[in-house]
């Protein structure tokens, strides 16, 4: 059984289908999705519909992203968030205007049962963004940090590669886990389009919301599969660019 991690999809349903096919995903694989299923391209409803059906036949773990919470708040409560609308929310709103009430209710239930994080049997941690508590995720005071924090990735990037784990100045929050898998902050900001590792943190967000591909990684072998640049699959759309 492979454990496969999928980065931020941002309504790129065509890219999701493509990368799963390229990785030859089967029912034997465990699939861990790092969140941000919506807000980006035009197929928010189709993406979430697919994920709901996928978990009926495959072993899936769905992590909560910040865009998922914002979209869920709008669907369930009508919460008006101008900032969300400027960062992909308007695209999701347009997609859901064509959805039935039953579909919207199923999607609200999907968003409500998303996990803030997942820790596997090999002490690998999976979450959308990060955490700040030096004792680890179980001691985090502010759960929203699991899908909003950027300091974990910033910390990993800024760490002196010569610093050893036994050094007293080594960041304590990185010591609790064998590896940490995140999305949230596109590696395209570093000029990269493939998953990047810093310290023991792997960032799998390769900019699918913008001009990058959607990525999937095998946590054991570190083999990576990618879709085409998502923008090429949605000609005529701007996404979040």
Image: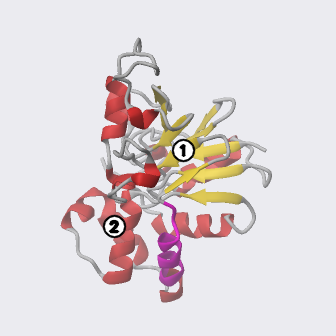
Q: Is residue 9 magenta?
A: no
Q: Does the stretch in magenta take in 105?
A: yes
Q: Return the mark for residue 86.
A: none
Residue indicated by mark 2 = 70
Q: Quadrant of residue 144?
A: bottom left
Q: Please say whether residue 237 is visible from this viewpoint.
A: no
* 23 horizontally vs 83: left or right: right
| Crowding at mark 2 (Cα within 10 Å: few <14, some 14-19, many 20+) | many
Q: Is residue 152 visible?
A: yes
**Residue at mark 1:** 125
Answer whether labels 1 and 2 touch (C-beta < 8 Å).
Answer: no
Q: Element at badge 2?
A: helix
Compared to residue 215, the image places residue 170 above or below, namely above
Q: Secondary structure at mark 1?
A: strand
Binning the other alpha carbons within 10 Å of mark 1 as few (below 14), some (14 to 19) or many (20 upward) gives some
Q: Name the quarter where the N terminus is drawn.
A: top right
What range of the chain is rendered magenta? 104-115
């Amino acid at each position: 059984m492979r454990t496969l991690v999928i980065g931020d999809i941002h309504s790129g349903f065509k890219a999701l289908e493509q990368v799963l096919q390229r990785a030859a995903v089967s029912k034997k694989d465990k699939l861990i999705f790092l969140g941000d299923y919506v807000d980006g391209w035009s197929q928010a409803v189709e993406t979430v519909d697919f994920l709901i059906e996928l978990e009926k036949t495959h072993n899936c773990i769905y992590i909560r992203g910040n865009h998922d919470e914002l979209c869920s708040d709008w669907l369930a409560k009508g919460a008006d968030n101008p900032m969300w609308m400027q960062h992909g929310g308007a695209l999701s709103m347009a997609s859901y205007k064509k959805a039935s009430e039953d579909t919207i209710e199923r999607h609200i239930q999907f968003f409500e049962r998303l996990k803030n994080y997942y820790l596997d049997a090999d002490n690998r941690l999976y979450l959308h963004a990060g955490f700040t508590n030096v004792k680890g995720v179980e001691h985090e005071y502010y759960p929203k940090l699991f899908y909003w924090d950027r300091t974990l990735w910033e910390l990993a990037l800024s760490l002196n590669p010569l610093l050893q784990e036994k050094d007293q100045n080594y960041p304590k929050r990185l010591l609790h886990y064998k590896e940490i898998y995140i999305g949230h902050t596109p590696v395209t900001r570093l000029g990269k389009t493939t998953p990047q590792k810093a310290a023991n943190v792997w960032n799998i967000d390769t900019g699918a919301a913008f001009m990058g591909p959607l990525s999937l990684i095998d946590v054991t072998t570190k083999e990576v599969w990618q879709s085409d640049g998502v923008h090429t699959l949605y000609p005529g759309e701007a996404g979040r660019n």
